[in-house]
Amino acid sequence: MKIAVLRGPRDLHIEERELNTSDLAPDEIWVETEITALKIGTDRGNYEGAEQVPGAPGYPRWVGDSNVGTVRGIGEGVTGFQVGDRVVSRYHHQSAYVGRESESIVKVPESVDSENAVFSHLYTLSAHCYRKAMFTPGENVAVVGLGVLGLGAVALGPLFGARVVGLGNSPARLEMAERMGAHACFMSDDADLSAKLDEFTRGAGIDLVILTANPWPAFRTAVEVVRDNGRVAIVSLPGRGEPPLDFNPLDMRWFYNKGLALVAVSQRGGYLFPTESDRFDGVRGCEHTLALMVDGRLEPRRVITHRMKYTEMVEAYEMAYRREKSMLGVVFSWRE
């Protein structure tokens, strides 16, 4: 099989590796990849050599964690999948893989397009931001950072009962956020931002901020715009790759005077106080996200700006490295 291997910063190769598919263990599943997706934030950081990414700090590293493919073989003990099923997983940029039934492999409903499904694990992370921050329908939510993950939070908000405002630094991203369902969008550096948010919330304030951007100015925006006793769900890595701070992120005016709650969000689960039977773990959360795609209420494919062959992957990562403004969602085809 073919797999993308990062041997050092900006040193990406498509390599051939052996994959044993003739002797599957009882719980193993053999999947042939159809498409994978590139996440501009985390995947670009990985490509650049960031240390705060999966697989760091060593090399070689695998890249990518959004994979849709077709089941080509199953072990004798597998009960949840059949040959021919389409599945989405968090496996890497690779042409095929053998995984275990207990891993984050989820069956894709027939009516869900693969280009939507490939973002389902990522959008499940967007959904976790609402669940873990104890969102209540009717609350005002600001999404700071309008990449693929942030746009997922924008799109899911109205489905969960939120009034959503998108905050970003690119007019094109604001336009995309409106297309994805935001009730309003503003530039983060708008001199009148406070007044506009006050009008948007009818004086009630922003109850929850979902922070998906790494730069410190985005963190500052998040803690400034949220109301007193509000929550900030952080699904980014604040300060990664940034120059030294020019402000105190734990300033008294935000955390003592405003009484903010910071909530760290990851793929591990969907509740602030999880139990052993956390309903929205990665797999069940992904199944819920896919269910929202069945009738077209959620369409992640709207964020796709580039459709490329896997042989063009190095070019795509270099475009991401150059911060090309036209790039947002990228999918790679692995079918010859």
Image (cartoon, grey):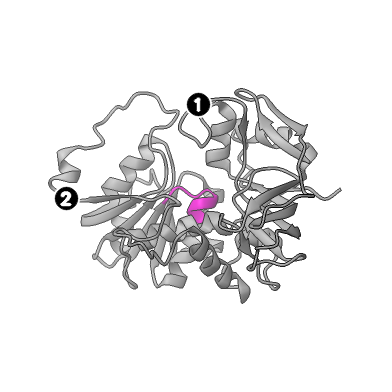
Pick whichever, 126 or 252, lies toward us: 126
User: Which residues fall within the magenta stretch?
Assistant: 144-151
Query: Where residue 142 sits: x, y (%)?
Result: 37, 57
Q: Which residue matches tag 1?
A: 57
Q: Which residue matches tag 2?
A: 258
Q: Amino acid at mark 2?
A: Lys
Badge 1: few (under 14), some or many (20 or more) residues near its Cα, within 10 Å?
few
Query: Where residue 119 sits: x, y (%)?
Result: 60, 56
162 lies above or below 147: below
45 lies above or below 224: above
Q: Which mark is residue 154?
A: none
Residue 175: tell me if it is visible. no
222 lies above or below 292: above
Secondary structure type for disc 1: loop
316 lies above or below 102: above
Magenta span includes 150 = yes
Q: Amino acid at mark 1?
A: Pro
Q: Could you tell me how many numbered marks the image carries?
A: 2
Outermost residue toward the bottom in this view: 295
Magenta span includes 191 = no
